[in-house]
Image (cartoon, rainbow, N blue to C red):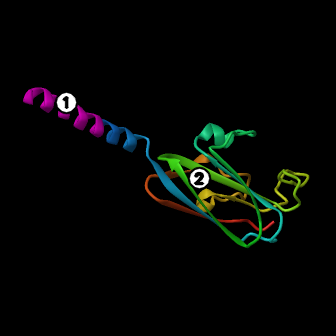
Amino acid sequence: MGTKKAIGNFWIVAAIWLLGLLSTLARADELNLVVDNIRPVEGNLMIQVLDSEPAFDAETAVPTVAIIQRVDSSSLTFSMDLPVGDYAIRIFHDVNHNGKLDENFIGMPKEPIGFSNNASNNFGPPGWSESKFELSGPTQQKIRMSDS
């Protein structure tokens, strides 16, 4: 009888250990996003968090997280839990509420934009390598919106 109980206890401990291992493999970490220099204080911020280079480069990406937030302050903060991995963020400020990034006749943005790592957009949008960051543990991205 004692051996059966010991074997039963072993399987219970093994199952608990396995569940703990699996939970660490699929763990989520917190991303804290701070967006500042939002001007004018009107319209909506259109935020995309993307988890791969193909998604980042796609014209019609399916983001991991999509946020549309009414602008009521020059600085906004967002928190989200995401699986550990590489991500990039792109934002545009839809000042006129038309749901798209307005561009001039040569394709340059007429509305403020921003990217993770504050990647530069001087000669076109930055690529995945300039914008990506690793989420492993609590992570903060502070993005300063461009002047339009």
Q: Position of residue 23 (x, y in %)?
A: 39, 42
> Residue 2 lies in magenta, yes or no?
yes
Q: Is residue 20 visible?
A: yes
The stretch of residues the image draws in magenta is 1-17
Q: Depth check: give the residue in front, 72 or 147.
A: 72
Left or right: 8 with respect to 79?
left
Q: Residue at x 77, y 66 (%)?
A: 71
Tell me which corner region of the image, top left, top right, bottom left or bottom right, holds residue 53.
top right
Q: Position of residue 128 (x, y in %)?
A: 60, 47
Mark identifier at residue 104:
none
Mark 2 nearby-residue class (10 Å; few <14, some 14–19, many ≥20)? some
Quadrant holding the C terminus: bottom right
Image vertical order of residue 50 relative to residue 5, above or below: below
Question: Which residue does the numbered mark 1 point to in the structure image?
Answer: 8
Q: Secondary structure at mark 2?
A: helix
Q: Position of residue 110 (x, y in %)?
A: 85, 60
Q: Position of residue 41 (x, y in %)?
A: 80, 71
Q: Mark 2: which amino acid?
A: Glu
Q: Mark 1: which amino acid?
A: Gly
Label 2, label 1: how many angstroms apart (C-alpha)?
Answer: 53 Å
Helix, strand or loop for the magenta stretch, by majority: helix
Question: Which residue does the numbered mark 2 point to in the structure image?
Answer: 130
Image vertical order of residue 55 relative to residue 77, above or below: above
Question: As drawn, which residue projects farthest toward the right?
Answer: 105
Q: Residue at x 61, y 57 (%)?
A: 116
